Image (spheres, helix red, strand yellow):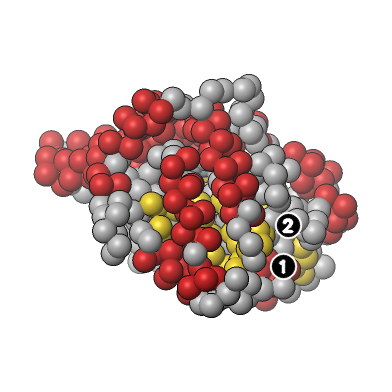
């Protein structure tokens, strides 16, 4: 599968959706106003089904041990959970287990690639690392739509190596403008882009970007944090070289993430973090490192969280990502229609539910986004407020911050109605029309 579902799928029935919602204990919480909380902040962190909560607790209760160390039962069980989870994620994204590097989050995954390239550029690594080197005269390309996690590491790498940072610009509605693909020049060594904007919800047209990068021999890194819980993701079909994933965006625990990379590129990358668990041999004079993925997994890993993430992936797989996408299309249409119907409200990003997911950022005339969030919280509707770690994109729209509603597989049309009703009260609360 590529950027969207390969064939039309049906939305969840109301009965199915009710059953899904019963799996999430937190949805029974009431808010400050005494009503059930309507949670529209899944892009910040997703809520967890009970099976995921139980899986993490069960690991600690029954299987806790250090992975790849010792020969006792608990160590063997912990190692099996750790490696089985690697295979589960690989299957979920269309990769191979040996291409999955565990990290503490997607941000660390991006930084692993950036620092490995930096280390290679300083002459570290073997002969194969030379293919990763960058320096003055080379270029890294991002887009103006990036989360800071996929912008700042590349700014820093350019500062360390003397390479140039360039970017793909945007259309007026905030989509990546393919007319700016000329930024990918023969000097380009890496292109790093988001799969879905965490502000506009726009799905990036990955194929033409990958093709432009391939034409000049550049690598491509894809940030899937806002796509992998909303759409089917197949790294092979997408044609990228690296992709990063975040457990807590995908119904899993915090503290776990992953970097997927093509095997030959991971093998070329020198290590970033060094220490235990990634060593083949050590003398007082030199160290030999293990092959990937272990080369990049120094120290103790969040094994319980990784095991529970595998449970979350199984849950998403049972729902069917095509059906998750179909449900989200229904919710996205309702969000866009409802939010844009409120006087004085401006939607940032595409106005139609085409090639976008249920991430809708908006501003309210005359009201600071933080105040918008507080008024809506008083009506037990939870939205994100701030710059969403995407200041350049907000600057593009001429604002400093926004409020954001983001959907999940549990989101209902009734919840959309409650959000729109709460939003319609915001301006009157501050004396507006």
Give x and y (percent) for residue 272: 48, 61
Q: Residue at x 44, y 55 (%)?
A: 41
Quarter of the image with the C terminus in it: bottom right
Q: Position of residue 355 (x, y in %)?
A: 68, 40
Read off the residue under disc 2: 174
Query: Is 328 in front, or is 109?
Result: 328
Compared to residue 62, the image places residue 367 above or below, namely below
> Left or right: where does residue 142 sit relative to residue 171?
left
Q: Nearer the viewer, residue 54 or 267?
A: 54
Disc 2 secondary structure class: loop
Give residue 378's quadrant in the image.
Answer: bottom left
What residue is rendered at 38% in x and 52% in y? 38
Q: CA distance from mark 2 to mark 1?
A: 8 Å
Q: Which image quarter: residue 167?
A: bottom right
Q: Residue at x 51, y 54 (%)?
A: 420
Q: For residue 172, say whether it is visible.
A: yes
The numbered mark at residue 183 is none
Residue 103 visible to an observer of this rendering: no
Instruction: Please tell me the numbered disc located at residue 397.
Output: 1
CB of mark 2 within 8 Å of CB of mark 1?
yes
Q: Residues within 10 Å of mark 1 (few under 14, many from 20)?
A: some
User: Which residue is at a point 44% across and 51% down the rendered structure image?
Assistant: 418
Residue 224 located left or right of residue 54: right
């Amino acid at each position: 599968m590529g950027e969207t579902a390969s064939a039309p799928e049906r939305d969840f029935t109301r009965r199915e959706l009710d059953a899904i919602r019963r799996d999430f204990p937190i949805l029974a919480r009431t808010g400050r106003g005494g009503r059930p909380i309507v949670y529209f902040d899944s892009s910040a962190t997703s809520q967890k089904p009970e099976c995921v909560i139980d899986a993490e607790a069960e690991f600690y209760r029954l299987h806790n041990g250090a992975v790849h160390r010792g020969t006792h039962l608990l160590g063997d069980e912990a190692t099996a959970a750790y490696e089985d989870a690697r295979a589960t994620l690989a299957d979920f994204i269309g990769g191979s287990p040996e291409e999955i590097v565990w990290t503490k989050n997607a941000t660390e995954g991006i930084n692993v690639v950036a620092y490995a390239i930096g280390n290679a550029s300083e002459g570290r690594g073997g002969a194969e690392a030379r293919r990763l080197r960058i320096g003055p005269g080379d270029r890294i390309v991002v887009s103006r739509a990036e989360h800071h996690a996929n912008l700042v590491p590349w700014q820093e790498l350019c500062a360390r190596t003397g390479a140039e940072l360039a970017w793909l610009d945007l259309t007026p509605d905030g989509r990546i403008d393919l007319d700016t693909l000329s930024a990918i020049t023969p000097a380009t060594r890496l292109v790093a882009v988001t799969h879905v904007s965490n502000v506009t919800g726009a799905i990036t047209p990955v194929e033409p970007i990958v093709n432009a990068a391939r034409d000049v021999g550049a690598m491509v890194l894809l940030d899937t944090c806002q796509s992998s819980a909303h759409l089917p993701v197949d790294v092979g079909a997408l044609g990228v070289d690296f992709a990063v994933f975040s457990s807590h965006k995908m119904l899993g625990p915090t503290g776990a993430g992953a970097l997927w990379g093509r095997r030959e590129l991971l093998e070329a990358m020198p290590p970033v973090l060094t220490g235990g668990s990634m060593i083949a041999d050590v003398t007082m004079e030199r160290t030999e490192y293990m092959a990937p993925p272990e080369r990049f997994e120094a120290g103790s890993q969040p094994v319980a969280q990784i095991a529970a993430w595998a449970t979350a992936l199984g849950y998403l797989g049972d729902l069917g990502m095509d059906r998750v996408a179909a449900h989200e299309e229904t919710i996205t249409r309702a969000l866009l229609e409802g939010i844009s119907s409120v006087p004085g409200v401006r939607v940032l990003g595409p106005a139609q539910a085409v090639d976008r997911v249920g991430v809708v950022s908006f501003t309210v005339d005359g009201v600071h986004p933080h105040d918008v969030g507080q008024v809506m919280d008083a009506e037990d509707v939870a939205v994100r407020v701030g710059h969403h770690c995407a200041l350049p994109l907000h600057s593009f729209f001429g604002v400093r911050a926004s409020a954001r509603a983001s959907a999940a597989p549990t989101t209902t049309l009734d919840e959309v109605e409650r959000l729109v009703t709460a939003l319609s009260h915001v301006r009157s609360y501050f004396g507006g029309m």
